[in-house]
Image: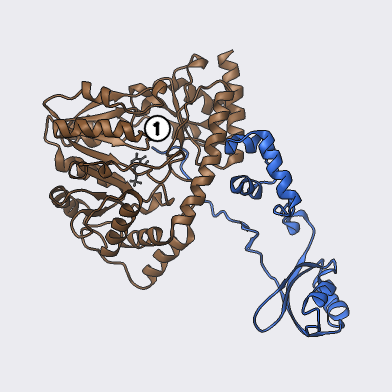
Amino acid sequence: MADKSHNFISRRAKNIPPSGIRKFFDLSEGVKDIISLGVGEPDYVTPWNISDAAISSIRKGHTMYTSNYGLLELRQELSRHLYKLYGVGYDPDKEIIVTSGASEALDIAMRAIIDPGDEVIVGDPTYVAYIPCITMPGGIPVPVPTCMDDDFEMKASEIEKRITPKTKAILLNNPNNPTGAVIKKDELLKIAALVKEHNLVVISDEIYDQLVYDGAHTCFASLPGMKTHTITIGGFSKSYAMTGWRVGYICAPDEIIEAIMKIHQYIMMCAPIMSQIGAIEALKNGDDTVAEMVADYNRRRRTIVAGLNNIGLECHDPKGAFYAFPSITSTGLTCDEFAEKLLVEQHVVVVPGTVFGQCGAGHVRCCYAVALPDIEEALVRMGRFVKKYGG
Amino acid sequence: MKDILKALEADPKTTPDQLATMTGKSVTEIKQTIAKAEKDGTIVKYKTVINWPKAGEPEVDALIEVKVQPQKDFGFEAIAEQIYRFAEVRSAYLASGTYDLALIVTGKTMQDVATFVTHKLSPIDGVQGTATHFLMKRYKEDNVIYDDNDGIARLVITP
Ligand SMILES: Cc1ncc(COP(=O)(O)O)c(C=O)c1O
């Protein structure tokens, strides 16, 4: 019998579309002097005090499982942290789970609330993991378009148009990957009103909460009456430059946490203990370093946004995260062609917008968590490229 | 202000135009801020960090602890100045603890440094003793970590 007839692969796995970024690995293979604006992580290494705390803990023999919920001290620190920043109170004993990154948090949150056929409203463009996280437990993603004219802010009015009797949840990403958009408080309040009216759950992925450049971040759960409707997801990867540590968290009312815990305890048991210990140090003594990194990202943000607009790639002002999302329609190329040719001809990597959804068409994502001289050089090369194609 | 200084500290070659873009301020405002900071000594100097051995110029540095007798009316100032004026002294600090002055002295060879200590430093009136530590390897200077790359690179593209 031919191997194919075994048909080992599940329909569910088959139905996950291939990742749109893999081919860029092949294209960049062996190319020297590449400047990559294609990353989704800080260029900083983890602040040393955090690494040091984790290393000493390993030396002392902290190498075991932790409580399924995560180390109590970390949950207490998280509770304090979220209360201090946003005035929202989560009980460290029963409203917080430490996860292996926000990635795991997203997956188990969806699995805990989605029944097959439930509709989940989600922004477009959107973080690449969201659609699979919705569809794997049988949910149906309902994309809400966002556009450059609104600075890619997700609008309550657009959400409302898509609410049906089957709508179970809204998945928010604030600040947003890939657009850098921040949803303003007045818009969040309008969304909150819909949530109340239609009795929906909000999964609020706020992993970029500390990377905002214009005013303060609003935690969705802190809005009046919203804590009981909200699953807050956050993490250490971005704010503290800890992507490789795989540690994040999920906060929700105890009833929801209990359901999520049933899944977390079997698929993950707990996040790595050394990463949890690093995360405690991050929360206790990380504020100054975060402030320095944010100030530095902000200088780069202004440089890249001004630079992109200068070379003819119209770019809105992204108020959070570390991404710019310029329009590339002036070149007459599709975003896929743009990204591919830019890599091959100018050795600059950007991510085509359609990787993040249909509304990403005509845009590319440029990460500015990149050294300033590299940003400047990338802009020069992109300028040459735009001249050639834009005419 | 802090934003401008941080950017200049990271790269003194950053132009006023670039600084204006980075901070969202006008070029005129940037130029005024810099001129003022230069004038009042907030910006001390624009400096280039050079790895001299790499440029084929051998260099030997020593950390020298100096115990001195403070002078009436002048305290440590006069004797410190008598010492730090020597071109060989790259940095000089008044320190608390078991000795008084900490110097970084640079020469082309160990002999150069030794000669400085025996012929210039030790004979000074009021210098009671010295301890010379030759520096064998430079790991980090002015926030720059030397050879800070063990080949770990970010992936070129991640979600
Ligand atoms: C919006 C968003 N959510 C979640 C994640 C995953 O983060 P973690 O490293 O905590 O799993 C990312 C990482 O790129 C992200 O951009």
In front of the other: A67 or A232: A232
Which quadrant of the view contains residue A103?
Answer: top left
Quick check: which quadrant has ligand 1? top left
In front of the other: B36 or B10: B36
Where disc 1 sits, the SS reads loop
Relative horizontal placement of residue A167, taking residue A190 as reference (left or right) = left
**Residue projecting furthest to the front:** B73
Could you tell me residue A174's position as x and y percent? Answer: 34, 37
Could you tell me residue B116's position as x and y percent? Answer: 85, 75
Query: Measuring 41% from the left and 39% from the top, which residue is drawn there?
Result: B158
Relative horizontal placement of residue A298, taking residue B84 as reference (left or right) = left
| Residue B54 in view (yes/no) | yes
Q: Quadrant of the C terminus of chain A?
A: top right
Which three-letter amino acid code belongs to the residue tagged 1? Ala
Query: Measuring 48% from the left and 20% from the top, which residue is drawn there?
Result: A328
Q: Which chain is blue?
A: B
User: The numbered mark 1 sits on a residue in which chain?
Assistant: A
Q: Which chain is brown?
A: A
Could you tell me residue A51's position as x and y percent? Answer: 44, 61
Could you tell me residue A192's position as x and y percent? Answer: 23, 34
In front of the other: B147 or A235: A235
| Residue A2 in view (yes/no) | no
> In the picture shown, does residue A157 fall above or below A287?
above
> In the picture shown, does residue A330 fall above or below B125?
above
Number of residues whose C-alpha sits closer than 10 Å to that of mark 1, classed few (under 14), some (14–19) or many (20 or more): many
* Residue labelled with disc 1: A181
